């Protein structure tokens, strides 16, 4: 028996052809993790944390998956590697980043995985795309909707809808 779960992922990157990397990540995620049911618009965002680098393209997607959170994490890490991701500098430039943001209403604290993502409420580049696809989802720890978290987000870095030329 296959149990359907849902997972919200954040996709982003700031190296090379950013749109192509996000498109390839979506294709591999749909093949290896589950059916993509919703996608936000693409957003161009200033780098967060390590700010001396090119702007990112970011997107939030929602998938149905039969896999556990740990299995989803392993598949995401494998896809990142397939797409040329090298983890050398914390918050540094990258071809693709795939973060598990939410998984059902689950709370997990493990050495390699925290759900909900621990910085979700502090990052406008995560909240804005998430609000586009699940604005009324209530954070299982903070007990506020994503819309409420976005209104109160301390991050003031610009997050703009990306319109390719």
Image (cartoon, grey):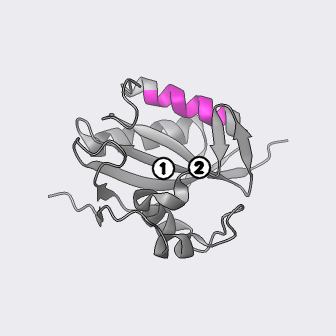
Q: Secondary structure at mark 1?
A: strand
Q: Are marks 2 and 1 in contact (CB under 8 Å)?
A: yes
Q: Which residue is mark 1?
A: 10
Residue drawn at (22%, 62%) of the image: 163
Query: Horizontally, is 39 left or right of 19 in the view?
Result: right
Q: Position of residue 13 (x, y in %)?
A: 33, 42
Residue drawn at (48%, 30%) of the image: 79
Q: Is residue 86 visible in the rendered structure shown here? A: yes
Q: Is residue 97 magenta?
A: no
Q: Residues within 10 Å of mark 1 (few under 14, many from 20)?
A: many
Tag nearer the camera, 2 or 1: 2
Q: Is residue 113 above or below residue 137?
A: above
Query: Horizontally, is 96 left or right of 35 in the view?
Result: left
Q: Residue furthest right?
A: 1
Q: Is residue 38 visible in the rendered structure shown here? A: no
| Magenta range | 71-80
Query: Horizontally, is 65 left or right of 75 in the view?
Result: right
Query: Horizontally, is 104 left or right of 87 in the view?
Result: right
Q: Residues within 10 Å of mark 2 (few under 14, many from 20)?
A: some
Q: Earlier in the sequence, mark 2 or mark 1?
A: 1
The circle drawn on residue 117 is 2
The circle drawn on residue 133 is none
Q: Position of residue 31 (x, y in %)?
A: 54, 37
Q: Is residue 143 above or below residue 58?
A: below
Q: Is residue 42 above or below residue 80?
A: below
Q: Secondary structure at mark 2?
A: loop
Q: Is residue 77 magenta?
A: yes
């Amino acid at each position: 028996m296959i149990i359907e779960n849902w997972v919200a992922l954040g996709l982003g990157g700031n190296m090379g052809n950013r749109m192509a990397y996000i498109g390839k990540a979506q294709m591999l995620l749909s093949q290896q993790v589950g059916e993509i049911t919703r996608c936000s618009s693409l957003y161009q965002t200033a780098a967060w944390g390590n700010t001396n680098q090119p702007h990112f393209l970011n997107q939030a997607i929602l998938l149905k998956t039969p896999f556990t959170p740990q299995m989803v994490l392993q598949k995401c890490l494998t896809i990142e590697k397939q797409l040329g991701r090298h983890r050398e500098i914390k918050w540094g430039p990258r071809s693709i980043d795939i973060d598990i943001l939410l998984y059902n209403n689950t709370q997990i604290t493990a050495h390699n995985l925290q759900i909900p993502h621990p910085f979700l409420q502090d990052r406008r580049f995560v909240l804005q795309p998430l609000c586009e696809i699940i604005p009324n989802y209530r954070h299982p720890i903070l007990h506020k909707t994503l819309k409420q978290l976005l209104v109160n987000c301390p991050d003031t870095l610009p997050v703009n809808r990306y319109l390719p030329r």
